[in-house]
Amino acid sequence: MIARAQALAALAEQEFDLVVVGGGITGAGVALDAATRGYSVALLERADYASGTSSRSSKLVHGGLRYLQNFDLALVREALLERQLMVALAPHLVHPLPLVVPAFDGVRPDRLMGVGLNLYDAMSLDRERLRAGRAAIGRSRRGRSERAQSASAAEAEPLSAPAQAKSETGESWSPERHRTISGEEVLELLPALAAREPTSGYLFYDCQTDDVRLVLTVLGEAERFGAVCANRVEAAGLLEREGRARGVRARDRESGEEFEIAAANVVNATGVWADGLSEESELPRIRPSRGTHILLRHEDLPLIGGAIVPAGEGRSIFALPWLGRTLVGTTDLDYEGELDHVSPSGEDVGYLLSAVNEFFDTAFGARDLAGAYAGVRPLISSGDPKKSVDISRKAELYEASSGMLTITGGKLTTWRRMAKMTVDRLVERDAREAPCHTHEIPLGQAIVVEDLPRVEGVPELSYAALAGRYGYAAREVLALAAERGELAQPIVPGLPDLLAEVALAARREQARSIGDVLLRRTRLGLLAARELPVERVADVLARELHWDAERTAREIALFAQEADAEGIRADAEPVDAKAGASSPDGRRVGADGERAGSDGAGDAVSREARSA
Ligand SMILES: Cc1cc2nc3c(=O)[nH]c(=O)nc-3n(C[C@H](O)[C@H](O)[C@H](O)COP(=O)(O)OP(=O)(O)OC[C@H]3O[C@@H](n4cnc5c(N)ncnc54)[C@H](O)[C@@H]3O)c2cc1C
């Protein structure tokens, strides 16, 4: 990404076709879609990129098996197609993940689940579209590779032969049908279940990602097509001319300076904050719902694939392998607290621990957690307080009388569809001929791990992690590690993230604070919340961002406050891990991080709020 100062100057000076407010996955997607259709785009993020809901998901790119129960077939189908497309567009970042529904004591796996999985399999297939997409991706990657070769010889080596071959043949993931597996196979995927001696299980597939890296990658692509993005810039209000939105009043949250950003169109992609940007009556009413996740060390609860874990009252949660830890979630409960820092409640943590302990026959308490986090879903209220189950996860597009478009709801998985819906409306309004291209634009450049240059001091396990996180750009991290030996060291001993990534985050990804680096460039704040070498990270940042000793000490104190407010150590409240696995009153949980039966991402444009 370009440096923040450079982005700020461009925002103040230029006039844009579109200003996007919000730097989560939805805003990033809109910026990419619009930029690739020829719009000049500015994107503002009030805090840090993905610091809202988009860093707090279950990290699944999935159809949402649960929604089949409610016959939300169109919504599941749409998400399944997006899932497959994401693996093709960003193979380094979106991975297939085997998931297991285990059965015990010789009992057959649940038949109803089997019926649902049959439907899930059938709905996953779209050979025609994938063929077209693969061919386009092959063409696009070849084009990029040629561009890369003509750039600086030192930096821009062509794609590795295997990576090229992969894109040229269009080889990409296609989910296997689900099948019944033996108890031994269950244990290969879920070693943590050894004490329970599973006798069989269903095996099916969904996909997994690092949600923040997906946002940063989409933003990087948007920038490649000319978008100008800046974090810590807030849209404080709309600029209006003759009743039409013509940009935003912006406030630089670092300097406090206010300035205007002129743009012909405004898109509000502020998630749970969506009802705060202008006239309330014209915006969707958001009813946030909190979801909590906890992380355990892989050594304590070893998983190779994911497990569907019963959580009482017919509910279930996930236990998933993620970045070398085991991620467990989630809960789903109406939330009325402050939105800037959402922390896991002791009650939620206890609930998740109880379900895990019951299922895996373990006795974990809050002190065993590697980390924890919570987020709020931007659910759109039906307006009827009695109908809480109707609160929708559907993506909705609203158009205010000023012309401002608000896009909210939806899922991480369906960001591209949401962006398309939004930009299609802009194109329709402007009577342009500008079809959507995002289905054929690779997200980052995948690279084969073996092709990364080896750098003295970099632990072997770091190479795969770097390739997965950055793709081709992993070379930049390694170049930094080669340049300054101390940057070749891991940030947390035993984990793959390198100090070079701290420097890269500051230089290339607009990281401005310790929290940006530990929570949203690396994910160490969640993976190793109790063992963070904050001073070491601060030292690297101080050098990159020219902090003096006083500023460095202040930043360290600010991170301590942020970590407390986020509750990443999950030690703020005592947890009763022994309280049964049944859900507390009013709680609704879903194994896919979503409230059962009310999610989806439809293409329907809600015109209720339009005045025209
Ligand atoms: C617990 C949980 C689990 C989930 N699991 C999954 C999952 O596994 N798979 C899946 O597909 N989906 C999942 N979801 C849903 C998914 O995470 C969200 O739908 C998605 O991240 C929402 O993205 P967004 O960009 O709309 O909102 P956000 O990510 O919240 O982005 C909005 C941004 O706008 C910024 N902003 C607000 N006001 C202003 C302003 N005035 N000026 C500038 N910027 C502003 C905020 O700082 C924020 O960064 C989950 C959600 C939760 C809560």
Image: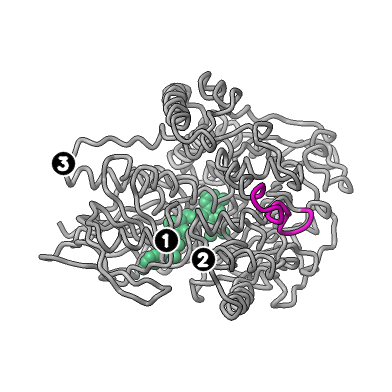
Say which residue label 2 marks. 512
Camera-nearest label, 3 or 1: 1
Mark 2 touching mark 1, by CB under 8 A?
A: yes
Residue 545, position in %: x, y? 53, 66
Residue ID at (20%, 62%): 245
The span shown in magenta is 481-494
Earlier sequence position, callout 2 versus callout 1: 1
Quarter of the figure with residue 201: top right
Q: Nearer the viewer, mark 3 or mark 2?
A: 2
Density class for disc 2 (Cα within 10 Å; few <14, some 14-19, many ≥20) is many
Identify the residue shown where x is 10% and y is 65%.
242
* Residue that numbered label 1 is attached to: 4
Disc 1 packing (10 Å; few <14; some 14–19; many ≥20): many
Q: Which label number is shown at residue 15? A: none
Label 2 is placed on what type of residue?
A: Arg
Q: Secondary structure at mark 1?
A: helix
Q: Residues within 10 Å of mark 3 (few under 14, many from 20)?
A: few
Q: Is residue 20 left or right of residue 490?
A: left
Q: Residue furthest top?
A: 169
SS for dot 2: loop
Which of the labelled discs sits on residue 431, or is there none?
3
> Alpha-carbon distance for marks 3 and 1?
34 Å
Q: Between disc 3 and disc 1, whose residue precedes?
A: 1
Could you tell me if the residues under marks 3 and 1 are in contact, i.e. CB atoms within 8 Å? no
Foreground residue, 485 or 51? Answer: 485
> Picture quarter containing residue 520?
bottom right
Residue 482 is inside the magenta segment: yes
| Label 3 or label 2, whichever comes before in sequence order | 3
